[in-house]
Image (cartoon, grey):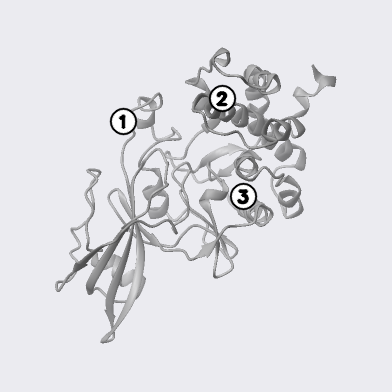
Amino acid sequence: MALGWAVRSPARRHGHSRRARRDDPLRHTGEVSSVVPSDVLRAATGSDVALQVVEEPIHGSSGAATAEVVRLTETVVTHGQKRPFSVIHKTVRPLSTGRHAEMATRPDHWAYWRREPLAYAAAVLPTGPGFRAPRCFGVHHDTAYLEDVAGGREDPRRAAEGLCRWQATSRVPSVDWLAAHQLEQRIAVTHLDWTTVDADPRAVAMWEARDRLLDELAVLPRVLSHGDYSLGNLIAADDGDTVALDWGTLGAAPAGADLAHLALSSLTDPLPAYLAASLDGPSPDDVSLGYRTTLVLTGSSRLHWMLSNSVPVPAGYVDFLQEHRPPVLRPEHL
């Protein structure tokens, strides 16, 4: 999950009197080029001359494959006139540590490091109107040059509506690098010791039912999924669109799964807004089941993480999970 583009750090300023080289792409060494490739400049501004570049590292991105996100603010020359322009320089790198590292080399693993540049290069991300990814001005190896989106915090209901319209009108593309069922992959290598934390027994029961809940998800229809559709990855853009950032977990997921991430980031129920916007696609019952099941599995594991790391648990967190749990966890089904 990543914060929006607005988070800034002290800038580094560079003057340049040469044209940006086409052979300037970054490798996954963590180095930052102060020159945007000329084809990117032309795509974004109509110019291939940058006289000055200011680098502003953007902190807060915790995407598994994110190496670096930098805002490059430039002075470009277009038709003999100087003007400012900014672009987001996002570099990815392989996951090398942690319990997911071994499997993350597989193209269908949720943490596969090349997925986001591949998705931009393949033009499979939403382009609007209403709901879209940042515009991409070029992909060079493991670096994507993206629109610097201006805007503010998105409303969860509006985010749910945009998500619904995208998923209802999009087919899952036939590419081998889409993430498979992310939640199933995560749970397969996750072992939680609840005896080490003081957790609400209701949340423990949700986690202990994970095999049964995964069976429920296994029979649901799959939809194209963002994979980390939380408020921290959403911008209410100044142009009126909902813009979703960080597409590194793009995949095919059970209907309703993305709604669970949105709900956990806002502790509000986005299901009514999603269903009200529905034009076509999975049935409301399937969406509801996928949402509620993903919500309690993801939410209970996050509770364990918060308690284990002394992170304050939001007020009403477990009550929210309990209120929106799937039918299989309600008393009449136990």
The part of the image, by quadrant, that contains residue 103 is top left
Name which residue type carries label 3. Gln
Residue farthest toward the bottom in the current orientation of the protein: 80
Which residue is identified by label 2?
304
Q: Residues within 10 Å of mark 3 (few under 14, many from 20)?
A: many
Q: CA distance from mark 2 to mark 1?
A: 24 Å
Is residue 181 visible in the rendered image? The answer is: no
The part of the image, by quadrant, that contains residue 183 is top right
In primary-sequence order, the first of circles 2 and 3 is 3
Which residue is identified by label 3?
167
SS for tag 3?
helix
Name the residue rendered at 51%, 50% in the picture.
233
Name which residue type carries label 2. His
Q: Position of residue 200 (x, y in %)?
A: 67, 22
* Front residue of this view, candidates 164 and 309: 309
Q: CA distance from mark 3 to mark 1?
A: 32 Å
SS for tag 2?
helix
Q: Position of residue 56 (x, y in %)?
A: 32, 59
Q: Is residue 70 above or below residue 249?
A: below
Between tags 2 and 3, which lies in front? 2
Q: Is residue 170 above or below residue 176?
A: below
Q: Is residue 307 above or below residue 225?
A: above
Q: Is residue 82 above or below residue 111?
A: below
Which residue is identified by label 1?
96
Name which residue type carries label 1. Ser
Residues tagged 2 and 3 counted as in contact (Cβ below 8 A): no
Residues tagged 3 and 1 counted as in contact (Cβ below 8 A): no
Q: Position of residue 333 (x, y in %)?
A: 81, 20
Along the horizontal axis of the image, is 261 left or right of 283? left
Name the residue rendered at 53%, 49% in the picture.
232
In primary-sequence order, the first of circles 2 and 1 is 1
